[in-house]
Amino acid sequence: MKFFKSDHLSKKIIWLCVVSFVILGLVASGAYAKQPQTSAVKKIESSTSSSSQSATTTTTTIQISQVANSTPASGASLLGPVNRIQIGSTLIGYRQFGTGPNLILLNDSGESMDSWGISLLTQLSSSYKVLILDYPGVGYSSDNTSVPMTINWIGSKIIKLVAYLKLSNINIVGQGFGGEVALEIAESQPKLVNGLILVATSPGSPASNLTPSNLSQLLFSTTATYVQKYQALFPSTAQSDLTNFLTPSNQLPIEPILNSTLIRQNQAQSDYISSNKVINSLSVIKAKCLVLVGDKDTIMPEQDSNLLISGLSNATKKVLPGFGHALMQQNPAVFMQNLTSFLN
């Protein structure tokens, strides 16, 4: 009360206004200083609500970083560097290159994004904007062993990566294990996918055919070499194609795969095969689908492709004579012809 009785009331009011403006200025500058100063940071906001509480907004910061010295040398330099992004509890490594419609390549189990070969990736880059990536626990991607590895869990990581990169109308090529991941993505996000190219892929369920135990043990082995595994993926009649694929000029540096990851992928594969979840939801997928299978494939017999055809509403099947499980690597030119014809 004494303040308002002062003879210098007008001066004190002016002084109070000055102090207030100074304080507001400091607060404003402090808030600005806390804003991210790099375009490599993306904030994703989501709202959650329940009957017991009002809607709340949470903000997740996703940091993308480039891996130093990860651009391949010489003829493979067009692939560019590896980028890594934090998605939940894991880091996902990926490369993105080329121009054209969006094309995502999902490799088989026990492999990394270096498994496609330079020849195939070079051909694809001339017609498509290509995205390749490492699954959790493979190569440039980290794992979280406290979380069970499932096909669906891997698919959810890729969906978030696609959202971060703002990709739409995507086309997905999935080979074996990668085809299973592609089916999970297409079922959970049917409007996201334009086309599916399923190579040597099974829809799972007890009706599907199991990979012979000796081959399954080899593919998920923690001691078998890269060459030994690929010898099982190429038919005996295509040894010259295998030699061409394995030539140093066609190979990217081989990325490591954790032994624990091989075990976890094997379990994820077993869970997928024993479940009816995917096969019972194939009708949800409205994207056009091309089912490719080699008649010499001993890993995923042709009969499983018939299960896909019977469940998908817009699918075409093509059997390639003389091709094994790794038909994309066996003859990239033949695969490109089928891919381009289908997508065009």
Image: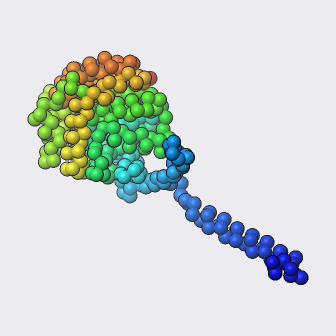
At 21% from the left edge and 36% from the top edge, which residue is drawn?
270
User: Which residue is found at the position 38% from the left and 56% from the top?
Assistant: 67
Q: Residue 250 or 323: which is nearer the viewer?
A: 323
Q: Is residue 141 left or right of residue 101?
A: left
Q: Quadrant of the C terminus?
A: top left
Q: Is residue 129 or residue 194 the one in the foreground?
A: 194
Q: Dividing the image into 4 quarters, which one contains the N terminus?
A: bottom right
User: In this view, which residue lies farthest toward the right?
Assistant: 7
Residue at the location (20% across, 40% down)?
266
Indicate how the structure is coloured in the image: rainbow
Q: Residue furthest front?
A: 1
Position of residue 39 relative to residue 263, above or below, is: below
Q: Say which quarter of the image contains residue 9.
A: bottom right
- The residue lying at 32 percent from left, 28 percent from top is 278
As drawn, the residue found furthest toward the left would be 214
Q: Is residue 77 visible?
A: no
* The one of 220 and 133 positioned closer to us in this rendering: 220
Instruction: Where is residue 308? Give x, y as percent.
Output: 30, 22
Q: Is residue 36 left or right of residue 267?
A: right
Percent position of residue 14, x then y:
83, 74
Q: How many marks?
A: 0
Task: Pinpoint residue 251: horizontal percent, then vertical percent.
Answer: 27, 44
Quadrant of the rendered image containing residue 75: top left
From where the camera sits, is residue 237 visible? Answer: yes
Quick check: 54 above or below 122? below
Percent coordinates x, y for residue 260 in the rendering? 21, 50
Name the foreground residue: 104 vs 244.
Answer: 104
